[in-house]
Amino acid sequence: MLNIVLENTIVAPPVSTSANWEFLVAVLAGIVQGIVEWLPVSSQGNLSLFLTLVGTSPEHALQLALFLQVGTTLSSALYYRDDIRESFAAVPEWRPSTAFIGANAVTTFVVVACLATGLVGIPLYVFAADFVNELSGGLFIAAIGALLVATGVLQLVSESVAFEDRNEPTLRDAVIVGAFQGLSILPGISRSGVTTSVLLFRSYQAPSAFRLSFLLSIPAGLGAGVLTVVTEGGVPGVSPSAAALAIVTSAVVGYATIGLLMRVVERIPFWIVCFGLGGLAIVGGGGVALLTA
């Protein structure tokens, strides 16, 4: 009897330690998501990289990174609440002939872009999940690095575009931006970086490009979270309480940092950050893969 009690006493601490570690990772993941979501650097890619480094499987890292976008979606919705209120107020007066005129333009842009995102992103999500299943941790990190470098190239090239003064989106803008946003389902491809760059290519001024990009992030983030839960039958790899903690952390940190980080985005060329992080991931991940081969 005494031996049984002692055995039970010995077994309990590792369970508690494991739970504490899970909550610590959840908080750190929420902080990472809350900060990098607003930058033209892939939040999903960097969060997947972080989760893989702390021991999460590559498959679960990708799925959790998608799910945690729900937290910063809540931050974005609160930050842009006036724009959202104006768009909803204009819905009763929406007509096909004025779909891209005035207050209706943003609403139509978001809806059409989301449809294009789904058509491109859902098949890619299925492909990406199968792809990362076949990678070791090192190769997964190296693949993220390559995609980060690709985002940096796009960001660098977009800086050389001559801008006009466009504010209202068009149907063509919505389809093109939505399709490119669908590519950000892949880890390492920055949703904000890609959509903002495409809008810059379409001759939008930077403030308008960022505004449209982040308004578009709201339904995209909710869709990513729902897609993860539906396809996986829940949040994969973590307990519901840890997932909730990560969501709350990312929402709080995201709201606190969005104003500051948006000002930073306007001043620093983030293609340098993409190149730096991507290069380190390629070298580090490739080295790990070679050592474990």
Image (cartoon, helix red, strand yellow):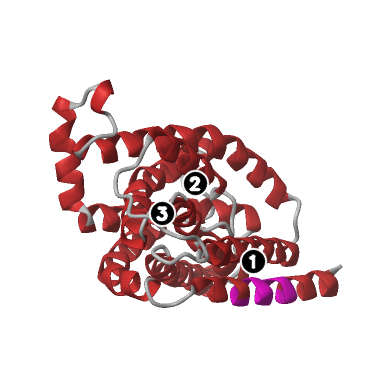
- Of labels 1 and 2, earlier in sequence is 1
Q: Is residue 244 above or below residue 230?
A: below
Q: Looking at this view, is 112 or 162 the one in front?
A: 162
Q: Which residue range is magenta in the image?
A: 276-284
**Local secondary structure at mark 2:** helix
**Residue in front for this viewpoint, 238 or 59:** 59
Q: Nearer the viewer, residue 39 or 58?
A: 39
Q: Residue furthest top?
A: 96
Determine whether the residue tagged by mark 3 lies in a helix, strand or loop.
helix
Residue 282 picture location, percent across and down: 71, 71
Badge 1 amino acid: Val
- The numbered disc on residue 181 is 2
Query: Real-space Cα distance between discs 2 and 3?
Result: 14 Å
The residue to which callout 3 is attached is 69
Q: Is residue 71 visible?
A: no
- Type of amino acid under label 2: Gln
| 92 sits left or right of 274 in the view | left
